[in-house]
Amino acid sequence: MKRGYEKIAFGGVNDAVRLLFEEEPDPRELERLDLNSVAEIRRVRDGLEIKFYDRMKALECLRSLEERDGKQPPLYRALMACARAAGKEGPDGD
């Protein structure tokens, strides 16, 4: 489950964008595309409509998984420390 959220949160969308511009994609080529970030593909009158998974929700799920396991990655801990420090200062750094 964690790996799936990581693919959504940090994966690329290049293959999905390339698919938008293909007239008639080769079925063999479709099998090689990285479409992990794609939630839905629909053929509409003028082409394709692609909906992507929400990256922010995937990041939130990863964070809650890390909290549940009692582990937080160093980058997350550093970001949280910066956020707490910024909250103690005024808007102008006072």
Image (cartoon, helix red, strand yellow):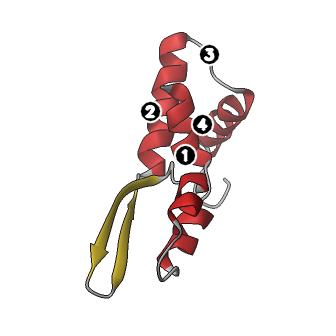
Residue at 46% x, 25% y is 64
Could you say which quadrant of the image residue 66 lies in? top right
Depth check: 18 or 7 in front?
18
* Disc 4/disc 2 C-alpha distance (Å): 21 Å
**Closer mark to the observer between disc 3 and disc 2:** 2
User: Would you name the residue on which mark 2 appears?
Assistant: 61
* Disc 3/disc 2 C-alpha distance (Å): 14 Å
**Closer mark to the observer between disc 4 and disc 3:** 3
Can residue 13 be seen at all in this image of the molecule? no
Residue 84, numbered circle: 4
Q: Helix, strand, or loop for circle 3?
A: loop
Residue at 26% x, 85% y is 45
User: Would you name the residue on which mark 1 appears?
Assistant: 9
* Disc 1/disc 4 C-alpha distance (Å): 24 Å
Q: Residues within 10 Å of mark 4 (few under 14, many from 20)?
A: few
Residue 71, numbered circle: 3
* Disc 1/disc 3 C-alpha distance (Å): 18 Å
Instruction: Give whichever of discs 1 and 2 has the lower sequence position.
Output: 1
Coordinates of residue 62 in the picture (x, y in percent): 51, 31
Q: Helix, strand, or loop for circle 1?
A: helix
Coordinates of residue 26 in the picture (x, y in percent): 53, 68
Instruction: Give whichever of discs 4 and 3 has the lower sequence position.
Output: 3
Task: Decide: is 90 above or below 65.
Answer: below
Tell whether label 3 touches label 4 (CB within 8 Å): no
Give the residue type that dot 4 points to: Arg
Instruction: Give whichever of discs 1 and 3 has the lower sequence position.
Output: 1
Q: Which residue lies furthest to the top in this view?
A: 70
Tell whether label 4 touches label 1 (CB within 8 Å): no
